[in-house]
């Protein structure tokens, strides 16, 4: 049975993948959603009582935890969002997975963008004057920066359901050595997805990430979805994105080892929180 590892990004945890896990489980995939270190549990509880040491969490520690999960599997597929998208690209570059989908991904190699939303949000998160103090996500910031295409009531509900606090060191590390990838090497199939209205990862930064891969013998694809925010995996219309990804996987991996007897049931899937 083909396995998919779903990797969440900053200010989220595995709960953010519940819709996708249901969809891909129904398609016969074995779905695994590991939590980053210090991100296990209910988002509301994590906001109320942030784990000790959260502000010191870095990308290398997160990546190592995902590598451990992947290494216990049989070259799974990986789907990652935001920093999870960068982790998906790193796993692909390390030849640990058979294919990757990176959605609204932090770009490797310290690629920047002059979009105002990108500059503002990156500066707030990475602010060096804050030291190791975590970034405490609030409903207003979540709406303005993360889920800006949603109505206020929708964004408030999404915040309650999925938002977590996070470590600003994660983004800092993404801009350093831990975020570097050799984009000239051959790699397994990769799909990069952009959200037109994303205030955190502008669509043209994702496109730049896509064009930076220059091995002509490797499959690299790009798709932009209109009127989507950084909350693309859960905002209204998420089904269209998930369906597109499923279609791309079917086309890129035409003979997945999925047991037809499991299609239509969610029992094979595992959510690690």
Image (spheres, rainbow, N blue to C red):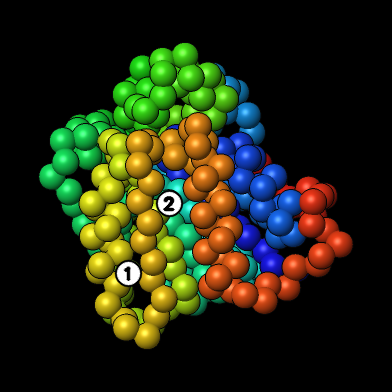
What residue did someone put label 2 on? 103
Q: Nearer the viewer, residue 6 or 225?
A: 225
Of helix, strand and loop, which one carries label 1?
A: loop
Percent across and percent down for residue 11 are 45, 35
Q: Which mark is residue 142?
A: none
Using the image, determine if residue 251 lies above or below residue 208: below
Residue 265: x and y, percent?
A: 81, 50
Residue 141 versus residue 250: which sits nearer the camera?
A: 250
> Residue at point 52% right, 64% down?
248
Q: Which mark is residue 181?
A: 1
Q: Which residue lies most toward the left here?
A: 114
Q: Is residue 152 visible?
A: yes
Q: Is residue 270 left or right of residue 70?
A: right
Residue 142 quadrant:
top left
Residue 3 vs residue 60: left or right?
A: right
Please tell me which residue is depicted at 52% across the width and 57% down the height of the picture.
Answer: 245
As displayed, is residue 162 above or below residue 196? above
Q: Foreground mark, 2 or 1?
A: 2
| Dots 2, 1 in contact, CB < 8 A | no
Q: Which of pointers 2 and 1 lies earlier in the amino acid sequence?
A: 2
Q: CA distance from mark 2 to mark 1?
A: 17 Å
């Amino acid at each position: 049975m083909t396995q998919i590892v779903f990797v969440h990004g900053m200010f989220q945890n595995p709960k953010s993948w519940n819709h996708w896990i249901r969809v891909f489980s129904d398609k016969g995939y074995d779905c695994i959603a590991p939590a980053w270190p210090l991100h296990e549990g209910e988002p509301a509880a994590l906001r109320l009582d942030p784990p000790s040491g959260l502000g010191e969490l870095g990308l290398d520690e997160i990546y190592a935890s995902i590598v451990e999960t992947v290494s216990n599997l049989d070259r799974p597929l990986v789907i990652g969002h935001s920093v999870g998208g960068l982790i998906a690209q790193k796993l692909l570059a390390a030849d640990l997975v058979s294919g990757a989908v990176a959605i609204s991904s932090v770009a490797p190699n310290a690629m920047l963008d002059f979009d105002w939303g990108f500059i503002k949000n990156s500066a707030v998160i990475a602010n060096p004057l804050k030291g190791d103090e975590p970034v405490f996500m609030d409903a207003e910031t979540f709406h303005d920066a993360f889920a800006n295409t949603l109505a206020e009531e929708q964004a408030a509900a999404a915040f309650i359901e999925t938002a977590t606090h996070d470590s600003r060191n994660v983004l800092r590390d993404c801009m350093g050595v831990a975020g570097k990838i050799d984009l000239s090497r051959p790699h397994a199939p990769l799909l990069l997805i952009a959200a037109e209205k994303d205030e955190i990862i502008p669509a043209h930064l994702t496109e730049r990430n896509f064009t930076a891969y220059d091995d002509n013998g490797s499959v690299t694809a790009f798709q932009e979805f209109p009127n989507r925010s950084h909350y693309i995996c859960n905002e209204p219309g998420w089904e269209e994105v998930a369906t597109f990804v499923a279609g791309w996987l079917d086309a890129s991996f035409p003979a997945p080892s999925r047991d037809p007897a499991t299609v239509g049931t969610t029992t094979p899937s595992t959510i690690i929180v």
